[in-house]
Image: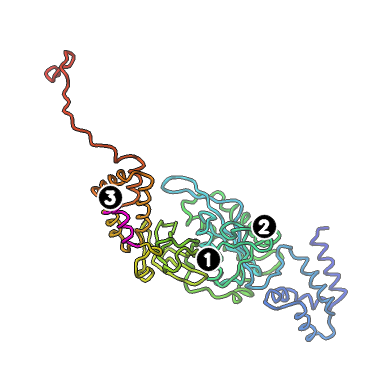
Amino acid sequence: MGDAEVIELFEKSNKTANPMYEDLAKDFPHYEKELARVGVTLFLLWEEYKERNPEGFSYSRFCHHYRMWESKLKAGMHIEHKAGDILYVDFTGKKMHYVDRESGEIKSAEIFVTIMGASQLIYVEAVKSQQLEDWIWANENAWRFYGGATRGICPDNLKSAVTKTCNYEPLLNETYYDLARHYKTVILPTRPGKPKDKPLVENAVRLVYQRIFAKLRNQTFFSLHELNEAIWEELEILNNTNFQRRDISRRGLFNEIEKNELQPLPVERYEIKHFQISKVEFHHHIFLKADKHYYSVPYQYTGKKVKTIYTSRMVEIFKDNVRIAIHPRKRLRYKYSTEKSHMPSNHQFVEGWNTDRFIKWASQMGGSIETFIELLLDEKEHPQQAFKSCMGILTLGKKYKPEDLEKVCKKAIEYNSISFRFVKNSLQNNTHKLEQDELVDLKLPFHENIRGKENYK
């Protein structure tokens, strides 16, 4: 006999032998849904059962009968999670593909999969990569798809989620952690190399292979958007198909027990933030590596380590979790964004370093050097911005002969190239030693083999 026939035989025998069990068994599908609600336990359900049936089963027999009924369901279909509690997320191991219309190149797409813990409602999306921006975007789209945020999210240990894996205290990616705070949820990564920590999403990936990958295998798509449209069409079919051995679908179960348990979504979508640890330089600015741009901070923090958080629009600088500066983001390479209030009133670089000192130092080395330093200081909105370059120019006087530095500075003034790089490169390449060659009037010598234009027709 097949397993189903054996189970049915025992069920009939049990019902015939004990009508009280038959009455209890009618409520098991209801108990299954109730157990997905926050705070509901078998003991609470048993107490309610005893109020209605004082002569009913004891607590131990009540639990035994329910667990036996539950074990007959497919193992992967057990609802053991509280509604609205955890969202499981992962990427499929296999990829899908689309063709670039312009180049004809076949491009691969990563497939992002999520599943709700209680209702097992699935979300799928094709993205370009597993990089941070795509990862953040896909997570947000999942919450928007469900219409709310779960109290926790369980990702795998990819770099965009977990910077450093650990069984006990993993180090989370700061941007992903900030996303979780924006949606008022917490990140609960799985242990590395422990697929049993996320059996639901592993089962969801298997279903995606069977119900989406397989059905779309012979179709050609010409953009990521086209691919996603086809995926979402098949996804709706999957979510609205009843579970095996149960008269309800994922979508139906979600609407019934989980939809109202989700946390409301914030009004605005999350704006991706990037993080950088910087040391405040001597001119009271930090250097943002992404844009190669300088941003000022109050001069009191010179030499201190600070955290820079920047988005597509703003740059914020923090010290000990207190914001000490904020600037609009600019992408002008090697330029300065300076707040006047951040600068010391006497234009000091460090104690005893000021514009007069640099000019006096330069005057002792040569007239062109002095003029170059004055022009360098005047070129900046705030003289402090040029102090580091001035120091670099004057230090070159120790490495090279003062007369060579004088020649290069004179040439820089003539060419209007007032920069440290021009002076340094000129000295390194010895361009100051190249004199302009005198023009020589060269004429072809007379020779019998040299013929004029009259020999050609």
- Decide which of 128, 215 is in the foreground and name it: 128
> On the rendered structure, is 63 left or right of 350?
right
Of badges 1 and 2, nearer the viewer stands: 2
Element on which disc 1 rests: helix
- Decide which of 5, 63 is in the foreground and name it: 63
* Residue that carries the numbered disc 3 in the rendered image: 366
For the point 28% across and 47% down, the residue is: 406
Place of residue 75 in the rendered image (x, y in percent of width and height, measured from the top left): 74, 63
For the point 53% across and 68% down, the residue is: 144
Element on which disc 2 rests: loop
Q: What kind of residue is marked 3?
A: Gly
Place of residue 416 in the rendered image (x, y in percent of width and height, measured from the top left): 25, 50
* Residue that carries the numbered disc 1 in the rendered image: 140
Q: How crowded is mark 3: few (under 14 residues within 10 Å), some or many (20 or more)?
A: some
For residue 341: magenta?
no
The N terminus lies in which quarter of the figure? bottom right
The dominant secondary structure in magenta is helix
- Determine the residue located farthest toward the front in the rendered image: 364
Q: Spatial distance from mark 1 to mark 2, Cα to Cα? A: 24 Å
Place of residue 227 in the rendered image (x, y in percent of width and height, measured from the top left): 51, 55
| Sooner in the amino-acid sequence: mark 1 or mark 2 | 1
Q: What kind of residue is marked 1?
A: Glu
Which stretch appears magenta?
354-370
| Cβ atoms at labels 1 and 3 below 8 Å apart | no
The C terminus lies in which quarter of the figure? top left
- Decide which of 313, 369 is in the foreground and name it: 369
Using the image, tell me which numbered label, if any, was put on residue 265: none
Place of residue 93 in the rendered image (x, y in percent of width and height, measured from the top left): 61, 52
Q: Spatial distance from mark 3 to mark 2, Cα to Cα? A: 65 Å
* Residue that carries the numbered disc 2 in the rendered image: 192
Q: What kind of residue is marked 2?
A: Pro
